[in-house]
Amino acid sequence: RQFHDIIMKVPLDNNDVIDTWEGTVKALQSTGSFNDWIREFWFIGPAFTALNEGGQRISRIEVNSIGTQSGEKGPVGVSRWRFSHGGSGIVDSISRWAELFPSDKLNKPASVEAGFRSDSQGIEVKVDGEFPGVSVDAGGGLRRILNHPLIPLVHHGMVGKFNDFTVDTQLKIVLPKGYKVRYAAPQFRSQNLEEYRWSGGAYARWVEHVCKGGTGQFEVLYAQ
């Protein structure tokens, strides 16, 4: 398992964020339950909600430093986190995704590990995991695959503003014997009878798509 320290900079430019930051500092200084607090922290709270609901293994988060520095619009909070089996980043789509694809319908827990490599060009993220799905009746003899709500976390470790980077992951679709895929969204490219490669394109655009309730990019219908 690889670990990587990620620095997150959060502009303290409104009262809600300032209150959250002060609460975070207080939790670090006066209690031993920081890992409980961080689950509600606005910056990665939705991600941890999805992790918990999906039955994930979450290692403890180690905070190496926390403080503030000056910025163009005022103070900027700075934290350094070390984690494994966790996720960080502004992922507003997670809570919406969990609504669209309820994890309580899943009969198998998910697991994920991420390794990171950073250089002057940015951060490269390698993720390996199992994200079980479930299917529902789509009418007309078709079944629709509901993907695991953790799918948006394929970006593990990307933080800060939405950069125009591409999300690319391998989704292996295994159908019941005798069934065939009847429709797959254009983002999917068939590799063989069971494997489809999904390319999400620019991260910001597909996250916005999910936040607005869109599921078309992940649509897969199958039937006998």
Image (spheres, rainbow, N blue to C red):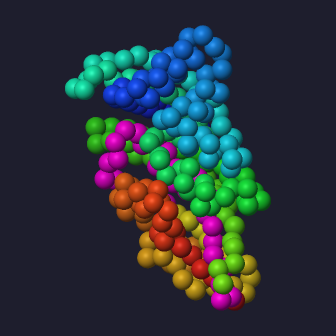
Horizontal side of 94 relative to 10 (left or right) equals right
Is residue 7 visible to the viewer in this orientation of the structure? no
In the picture, the quarter occupied by the N terminus is: top right
At which x and y percent is residue 93? 49, 52
Residue nearest the observer in this picture, 114 or 43 = 43
- Residue 161 visible in this rendered orientation of the protein: yes
Picture quadrant where residue 69 is located: top left
Q: Who's the residue at 65% across and 27% down the image?
A: 36
Tell me: residue 90, above or below residue 199. above
Q: Nearer the viewer, residue 161 or 15?
A: 15
Check if residue 152 falls in the magenta segment: yes
Residue at image position (65%, 89%) is 140
Q: Position of residue 165 (x, y in %)?
A: 34, 53
**Residue ranking furthest to the front:** 15
Q: Which residues are magenta?
A: 140-169
Q: Residue at x 69, y 72 (%)?
A: 135
Quadrant placement of the C terminus: bottom right
Q: Residue at x 41, y 16 (%)?
A: 67
Residue lying at the far top of the rendered structure: 30
